[in-house]
Image: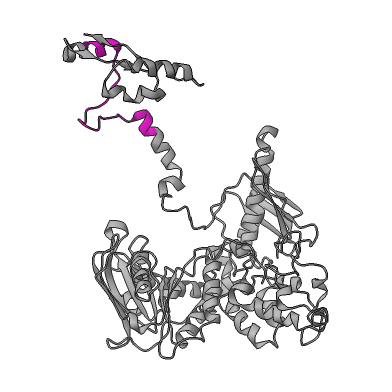
Amino acid sequence: MERGGEVVFFGPPDALLHAEDSLTADYLAGRRRVGADSSAAAVRPRDPHLEVLGAAAHNLRGIDVRLPLNRLVVVTGVSGSGKSTLIQDVLYNALAKLKGKPGEPAGTHREVRGAELVEEVVLVDQSPIGRTTRSNPASYVGAFDAIRKLFAAEPLARERGYTAGTFSFNSGTGRCPTCGGNGFEHVEMQFLSDVYLRCPDCDGKRYRPEVLEVKMMPEGGGRGRSIAEVLEMTVAEAVSFFAESAEIRRVLEPLAAVGLEYLRLGQPVPTLSGGEAQRLKLAGHLAGSGRRKAGRGNLFLLDEPTTGLHFDDIARLLGAFGRLLAEGHSLIVIEHNLDVIRAADWLVDLGPEGGEGGGAVVCCGPPQAVAVHPESHTGAALRSYREELAALAEKAARPQEGGEGAVMEAETAPAIRIMGAREHNLRHVDLFIPRGRFTVITGISGSGKSTVAFDILFNEGQRRYLESLNAYARQFVQPASRPEVDAIFGIPPTVAIEQRTSRGGRKSTVATLTEIYHFLRLLYVKLGTQHCPDCGLAIEPQTAEAILARLLKKWRGREVDLLAPLVVARKGYYTDLAKWASKAASHCHHPVLEPFRGGRGLGRLIPGRL
């Protein structure tokens, strides 16, 4: 976001409470609040509601759950308590089937009641929106069509006969013919990762030069912008630029309402994080929420939408929830964030533990009732959170003590020093991060946190590590480009643990994802004991003498056919040997020799008598 990229505070957490220009400090000190405790009217038994009866999928224990409609319902519980199983596997899949849009089979349950009270069921999760780089926030919410129509209405566009299709980079004659409107060229590498190069003809702008000559002037005056420059605008800039267009404002304002005003209109959707993708889906539904049948709203199911969000972002997200509720929709949210839990109208707390110890309904009711429940972990967390907020507010009211000394001590300690960082929206900032300490980088969405952590620290640490390898090893890897900084000192080799959802398919497991599976296979090969599938006896190595003694004992006086490999652990083709084995097998008539007839096997047959 253009308003971010600056360091507003550096120091210990206690000193942060007294920072004047920090939104984080305002929320921690109680000067701002994410959302007031729920003040909606109490949920009554006769209010519209859904009922899930006999849910027994995975670790659920045949539970019955009542979910009020036209409310903010939050499903809580420790990890593994059954929240996603109840809401996604059972409720969503069952309702989708009842609405004529079946997908995955619903988890085990007896019945779902009240489906007729909702128009549609919408699952807003963190799964990727799409894999094509042509999809962007503007096209997802429907703003790009209206923008192209405005450009086609410009006098120069009408004079040249341009239509709205001319300003599309997906098709038409206006896109760059070299890159096909991608803005880059994809170069496939045989042994290395594929390379994406900026298009030399359009310089990444996606359009022909003559199309970019069409400029749109803002209503209030100012410099005209081409279609490529509009796609480079952030949502906040676009809302201001198109202030006179009610249609474009209507579809862009939901993006700002869910805290995505820092996204650029043309940013490829696959580059968004899971949380950003989830909020973009929510903004898309907000943009089209006015078109529904009277008397029935949609049911929105959300899975941890606050993941990675700042206090201020969560406050705005709760505002978007309130807007959906005001339009007659219903919300069921799986959530761990205590601010969202406190703002809920109704809680369903599952547990009490995770895995085999979960799957039961601990308690249901408003947050005030859950907070006093003696067996609820969520209730204990709510009580503790209330006390911690009060303690922080009290501490913030007292004069600051010792903050300068702690900062000076940190500045003299061994640290990673970043000088003149200007990557993305960073504004020539100087940073130093103490080594051997637990450092937290905070700020609202788009303030530059990921730029510092991943684009600068991680990429530079990896690049320097790769440069330390020999020339032979370096030829197999593609080092990252240098970040836009003046200098970085004291950086060690780095490891990044990003929040990404694995989409490896049904054969992908925890063992394969963590590569434990390879070690398990090796252990079984080296240490495992084979057993006969018929008699269950262990298969053990035997000496030639032991084999002979066993044959003499069991088959004495009878004719036996002994088959043994003639070629072992040798590469090559042995066609002549196979022909010889086939010819030798043709003189013997025994079912076990069938694989050797017709050149299908290798071996040497030695009929004999014991």
Horizontal side of 223 relative to 516 (left or right) equals right
Q: Which residues are magenta?
A: 523-549
In this view, 576 is above or below 87: above
Horizontal side of 497 relative to 482 (left or right) equals left
Horizontal side of 571 relative to 402 (left or right) equals left
Within the image, what quadrant is residue 131 found in? bottom right
Q: Nearer the viewer, residue 156 or 385?
A: 156
Q: Nearer the viewer, residue 255 or 410?
A: 255
Q: Position of residue 449 (x, y in %)?
A: 62, 62
Q: Position of residue 494 (x, y in %)?
A: 60, 47
Within the image, what quadrant is residue 116 found in? bottom left
Q: Position of residue 95 (x, y in %)?
A: 35, 74
Q: Is residue 536 magenta?
A: yes
In this view, 252 is above or below 79: below
| Residue 83 visible (yes or no) | yes
Q: Residue placed at 51% from the left, 83% from the top?
A: 289
| Residue 374 visible (yes or no) | no
